[in-house]
Image (tube, rainbow, N blue to C red):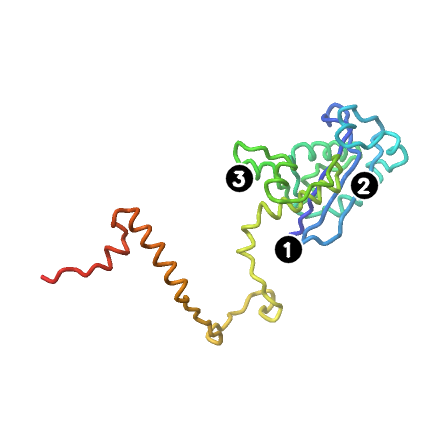
Amino acid sequence: MRQIVLDTETTGLSAEGGDRIIEIGCVELVARKLTGNNKHFYLNPERDSHEDALKVHGISNEFLRDKPKFAAVAEELMEYLAGAEIIIHNAAFDVAFLNKELELVGKPLFKTHVGQVTDTLAMAKEMYPGKRNSLDALCDRLGVDNSSRTLHGALLDAELLADVYINLTRGQDALLIDISSSDTVGGIVTRVDLTAFTLPVLLASDQETAAHEEVLKQLDKASGGKTLWRIQTVPMPVA
């Protein structure tokens, strides 16, 4: 399934209270790889941003005056998102705003257009209970460079979240096997004959063996001579 990492910026915090979306950023992942097929819109919200919101995103009301309204981009956006898994940090917030925008243009709820919605905030809370799980905190924890994020921006935040999501789910890489098209018939994986492969046996060097033995001695000493491998190597008395 295609995955789209999505973020919005808004005039304030309440979709039901009349606040609107002013920016949408989308980053596409296919097979957990960035494709570069992204979408980015600035929108005229037909109202001014709250002062607190301006401090967060820094997008002036004047800048948005000549930008398209949501109705003008709704069809293009929904076609782009159609059927994809949508990855959002604190999904309830963004989905509430998208639902309101869609309602205003007479379109069905957001979830009817997409395959599913994945909330990375919920994922992070499960993985790191009791810790800060904001986007900035996750970037710091997972080694994602967010030094260019002085203000919130939908496309930049979506790009950062894509890196965060890949890191959050990196353990899944072990389950992915690269299979060339020559190994499949009609999309079904064919049996691979492993008898043709000869695996080399790499023996430990004398130095590595001696280091290993020293570690075993230290463990045996710390346990008072009760390590299982030492007991098992002691010859049993003959009756």
**Label 2 neighbourhood size at 10 Å, few (<14), some (14-19), many (20+)?**
some
Tell me how far mark 3 sits from mark 2, CA to CA: 32 Å
Image spot of residue 165 (x, y percent): 62, 45
Res. 127 mark: 3
**Whole-number angstrom distance, CA of label 3 to CA of label 1:** 23 Å
Q: Work out whether mark 3 precedes mark 1 in sequence or the reverse, and give the earlier one.
A: 1
Name the residue type under label 2. Answer: Phe
Tag of residue 31:
1
Q: Is residue 166 left or right of residue 28?
A: left
Residue shown at the point (9%, 61%) measured from the top left: 239
Q: Nearer the viewer, residue 201 or 41?
A: 201
The quarter holding residue 21 reads: top right
- Taking the image as shown, residue 213 lies to the left or right of residue 175, namely left
Q: Secondary structure at mark 1?
A: loop
Seen at 55% across and 35% down, the residue is 125
User: Which quarter of the figure has residue 113?
Assistant: top right
Relative to 235, is 116 on the left or the right? right
Q: Are marks 3 and 2 in contact (CB under 8 Å)?
A: no
Q: Looking at the image, how many numbered discs can be counted on the residues?
A: 3
Q: Nearer the N terminus, badge 3 or badge 2? A: 2
Query: Where 134 falls versus 30 (above or below)?
Result: above
The span from disc 2 to disc 1 (Cα, nearest Å) is 25 Å
Q: Which residue is mark 2?
A: 41
Name the element at disc 3: helix
